Image: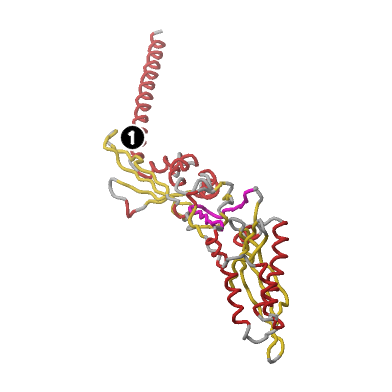
């Protein structure tokens, strides 16, 4: 009996010591593990690997938010730029490497790469607080640099001021206006007679990526092609500001006036006073043109007979000015009989016409 009791006591004792040994071993392993874990944290590479576990699209989107705002977000939103130009460089393409030139004993800088393209950096520094005798590495700065995607883009379109221009669906306003012009060469003279041609304005867009799409609409909402000659369009609109009745009557008037004017100035058939009598009803009494034609009679009596007569005439345009005045731009061809037979000459002139209650009269004629 005593022998059996001794054996049981021995077994209990061994079990107790085994439990104690296991507890001591476990505590030792925990301490050792904490020590190893703490030691690992003293290595910057470990902190960088932990950082990369949190590196994802949302983090990048947050870090580049201000950068995306440096583009014209009226034309391209932050989301469009991120999805089109930054997202394709993320994911499995991202890697990192230590930057020795910017690192030292207390600071380590890692370069973030997309394949071989530098896209940012992460800076680690040792903390001042110690744990188990070790100082850990913490992320103190993270920067993304996608400035390389920026393009020196600039696009412009010039249209009539009354037109609407959109770019990528956004209606361009005053801040995009970069130029204004009102140069129509042969029509500049109209300003002297109270008719100002519409301005042409230039819209310019910058700070965008890739291509942009302009669309141009007139006052009625009709779309126009970008390569349309808008200057000619405005000229044609201005030149066609007469009603059908005005155009018809003025066309007949100019045809007759021009015929009699050429006959008078060329002493056609030597009928000086007869030619003047035909022309006079078409002249505005008291006007510079009427005075000039009357004064020309004195020279007609001794000038030779040139037998001028009009061969043909084209009306280039008729424009309504102010206070019943019109300008008729014409090109006419004159047959002149000289020593070597008939010679045809081309002439260009603007006839200024006054439409009054008593009729239609020419008040001035300027050749050019």
Q: Residue furthest top?
A: 1
Q: Please state the horizontal and vertical placement of residue 365, each as a whole percent of the image.
A: 60, 70
Q: Is residue 2 left or right of residue 177?
A: left
Res. 228 visible in picture: no
Residue at point 68%, 89% (across, down): 338
Q: Nearer the viewer, residue 223 or 81?
A: 223
Residue at point 40%, 14% (across, down): 7
- Which stretch did the figure color magenta? 197-219
Residue at point 61%, 78% (across, down): 297
Res. 118 visible in picture: yes
Q: Please state the horizontal and vertical placement of residue 265, each as a whole percent of the image.
A: 64, 78
Q: Nearer the viewer, residue 97 or 158?
A: 158
Q: Which residue bears the numbered disc 1?
A: 35
Q: Nearer the viewer, residue 32 or 164?
A: 164
Q: Is residue 166 above or below residue 8?
A: below
Question: Is 367 in the magenta?
Answer: no
Q: Is residue 27 left or right of residue 231?
A: left
Quadrant (top left, top right, bottom left, bottom right) of the C terminus? bottom right
The colour scheme applied to this rendered structure is: secondary structure
Question: Is 204 in the magenta?
Answer: yes
Q: Please state the horizontal and vertical placement of residue 71, each as a whole percent of the image.
A: 47, 49
């Amino acid at each position: 009996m005593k022998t059996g009791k001794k054996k049981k006591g021995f077994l209990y004792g061994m079990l107790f010591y085994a439990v104690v040994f296991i507890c001591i071993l476990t505590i030792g392993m925990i301490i050792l593990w904490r020590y190893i874990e703490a030691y690992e944290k003293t290595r910057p590479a470990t902190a960088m690997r932990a950082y990369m576990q949190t590196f994802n699209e949302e983090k990048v989107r947050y870090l580049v938010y201000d950068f995306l705002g440096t583009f014209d977000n009226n034309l391209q939103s932050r989301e469009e730029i991120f999805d089109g130009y930054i997202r394709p460089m993320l994911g499995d393409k991202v890697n990192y490497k230590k930057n020795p030139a910017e690192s030292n004993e207390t600071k380590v800088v890692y370069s973030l790469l997309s394949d071989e393209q530098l896209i940012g950096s992460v800076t680690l520094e040792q903390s001042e607080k110690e744990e188990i005798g070790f100082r850990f590495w913490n992320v103190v700065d993270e920067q993304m640099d996608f400035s390389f995607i920026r393009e020196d883009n600039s696009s412009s379109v010039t249209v009539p001021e009354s037109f609407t221009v959109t770019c990528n669906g956004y209606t361009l306003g005053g801040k995009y206006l970069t130029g204004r012009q009102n140069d129509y060469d042969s029509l500049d003279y109209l300003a002297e007679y109270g008719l100002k041609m519409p301005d042409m304005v230039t819209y310019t867009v910058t700070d965008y990526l890739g291509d942009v799409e302009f669309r141009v609409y007139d006052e009625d909402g009709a779309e126009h092609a970008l390569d349309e000659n808008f200057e000619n369009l405005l000229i044609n609109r201005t030149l066609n500001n007469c009603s059908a009745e005005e155009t018809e009557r003025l066309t007949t008037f100019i045809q007759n006036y021009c015929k009699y004017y050429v006959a008078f100035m060329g002493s056609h058939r030597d009928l000086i006073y007869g030619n003047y009598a035909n022309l006079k009803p078409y002249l505005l009494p008291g006007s510079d043109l009427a005075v000039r034609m009357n004064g020309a009679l004195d020279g007609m009596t001794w000038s030779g007979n040139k037998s001028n007569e009009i061969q043909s005439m084209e009306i280039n345009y008729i424009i309504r000015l102010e206070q019943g005045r019109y300008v008729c731009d014409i090109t006419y061809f004159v047959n002149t009989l000289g020593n070597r037979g008939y010679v045809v000459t081309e002439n260009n002139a603007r006839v200024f016409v006054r439409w009054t209650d008593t009729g239609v009269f020419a008040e001035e004629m300027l050749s050019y």
